Image (cartoon, rainbow, N blue to C red):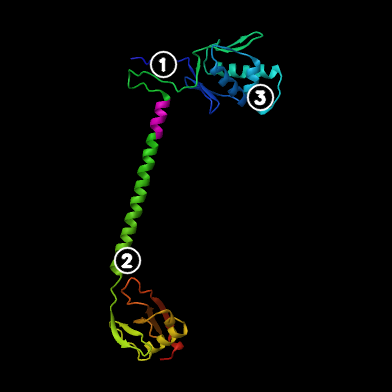
């Protein structure tokens, strides 16, 4: 079944300065586009040269001759004919002006009454293609985000699995009032806690309210690893500071 479409209607896109009809396209210059916009607004009416001059050049403060106006009219007429407009689409009225024949040019998107689902205008196909591309991009974005979330989850699970719980045993309190704890299974040298205490004192940590020392087991015996904290290490406000001391610094 046929589709009701006026095949001779030329579509004018002012934003792109472009006209098209039945797949044929032509691009207009700035002055020609302004001229066609004026003629289309007053289609069926005679538009004199003065109005054409004002629309094409007046706002830019450019002075042109009548020859320039005739030239831009010629450009508009040739462009319209090149895409299939009828020969009388733009009529010259001697000593009066120019007239755009009504019903030949429109600046509205063409609409159709479809009686056959297989017959679709080109602009509908383009819209469907753009929508399909947007949907595909969304699917890709969702897949990427999902992949990132899964990757983070896997890394978190693996890190959680390899992190062992560290327990500390209370060893007593130093004369300064610092409570000393050692990592479970670690036998701390007798002077280790006192050295950490002295170092904390020199560093100004004791005056800042640090009151807990946690001595850690290290793989290298020449190193001392310790935390000094303002509150018990398992508290959220413990504010612990890590210290790593080389054996030569204290000599025990």
Along the viewing direction, whichever of 81 and 29 lies nearer the viewer = 29
Magenta residues, start to end: 123-130
State the residue position of label 1.
5
**Number of other residues with Cα within 10 Å of mark 1, as a class: few under 14, some 14 to 19, many 20 or more:** few
Identity of the residue drawn at 52% across and 14% down: 85
Disc 3 and disc 2 in contact, CB within 8 angstroms: no
Along the viewing direction, whichever of 46 and 108 lies nearer the viewer = 46
State the residue position of label 3.
58
Mark closer to the chain start, 3 or 2: 3
Give yes or no for residue 127 being in the magenta stretch: yes
Q: Main secondary structure of the magenta part?
A: helix
Report how far apart the C-alphas of labels 2 and 1 lie in the structure. 67 Å
Residue 204 placement (x, y as % from top left): 46, 82
Describe residue 69's horizontal placement relative to residue 37 as left or right.
right
State the residue position of label 2.
159
Describe residue 192's horizontal placement relative to residue 9 as left or right.
left
Report how far apart the C-alphas of labels 3 and 2 lie in the structure. 73 Å
Identity of the residue drawn at 63% across and 18% down: 51
What is the quadrant of residue 205 in the picture? Answer: bottom left
What is the quadrant of residue 36 in the picture? Answer: top right
**Number of other residues with Cα within 10 Å of mark 2, as a class: few under 14, some 14 to 19, many 20 or more:** few
Mark closer to the chain start, 2 or 1: 1
Mark closer to the chain start, 1 or 3: 1
Q: Residue furthest top?
A: 94
Disc 1 and disc 3 in contact, CB within 8 angstroms: no
Q: Secondary structure at mark 2?
A: helix
**Number of other residues with Cα within 10 Å of mark 3, as a class: few under 14, some 14 to 19, many 20 or more:** some
> Looking at the rendering, in which quadrant would you find the N terminus?
top left
Residue 111 placement (x, y as % from top left): 41, 20
Residue 141 placement (x, y as % from top left): 37, 46
Q: Secondary structure at mark 3?
A: helix
Q: Secondary structure at mark 1?
A: loop
């Amino acid at each position: 079944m046929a589709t009701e479409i006026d095949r001779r209607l030329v579509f004018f896109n002012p934003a792109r300065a472009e006209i098209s009809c039945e797949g044929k396209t032509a691009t207009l210059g700035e002055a020609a586009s302004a001229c066609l916009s004026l003629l289309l607004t007053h289609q069926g009416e005679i538009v004199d040269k003065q109005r054409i001059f004002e629309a094409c050049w007046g706002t830019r403060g450019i002075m042109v001759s009548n020859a320039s106006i005739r030239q831009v009219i010629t450009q508009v007429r040739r462009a319209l004919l090149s895409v299939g407009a009828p020969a009388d689409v733009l009529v010259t009225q001697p000593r009066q002006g120019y007239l755009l024949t009504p019903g030949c040019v429109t600046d509205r998107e063409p609409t159709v009454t479809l009686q056959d689902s297989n017959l679709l205008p080109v602009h509908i196909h383009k819209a469907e293609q753009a929508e399909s591309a947007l949907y595909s991009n969304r699917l890709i974005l969702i897949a990427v985000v999902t992949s990132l979330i899964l990757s983070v989850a896997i890394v978190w699970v693996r890190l959680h699995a390899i992190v062992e719980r560290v327990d500390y045993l209370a060893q007593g309190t130093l004369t300064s009032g610092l409570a000393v704890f050692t990592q479970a299974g670690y036998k701390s040298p007798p002077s280790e806690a006192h050295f950490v205490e002295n170092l904390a004192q020199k560093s100004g940590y004791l005056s800042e309210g640090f009151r807990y020392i946690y001595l850690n087991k290290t793989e290298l015996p020449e190193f001392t690893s310790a935390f000094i904290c303002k509150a018990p290490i398992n508290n959220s406000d413990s504010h612990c500071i890590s210290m790593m001391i080389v054996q030569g610094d204290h000599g025990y």
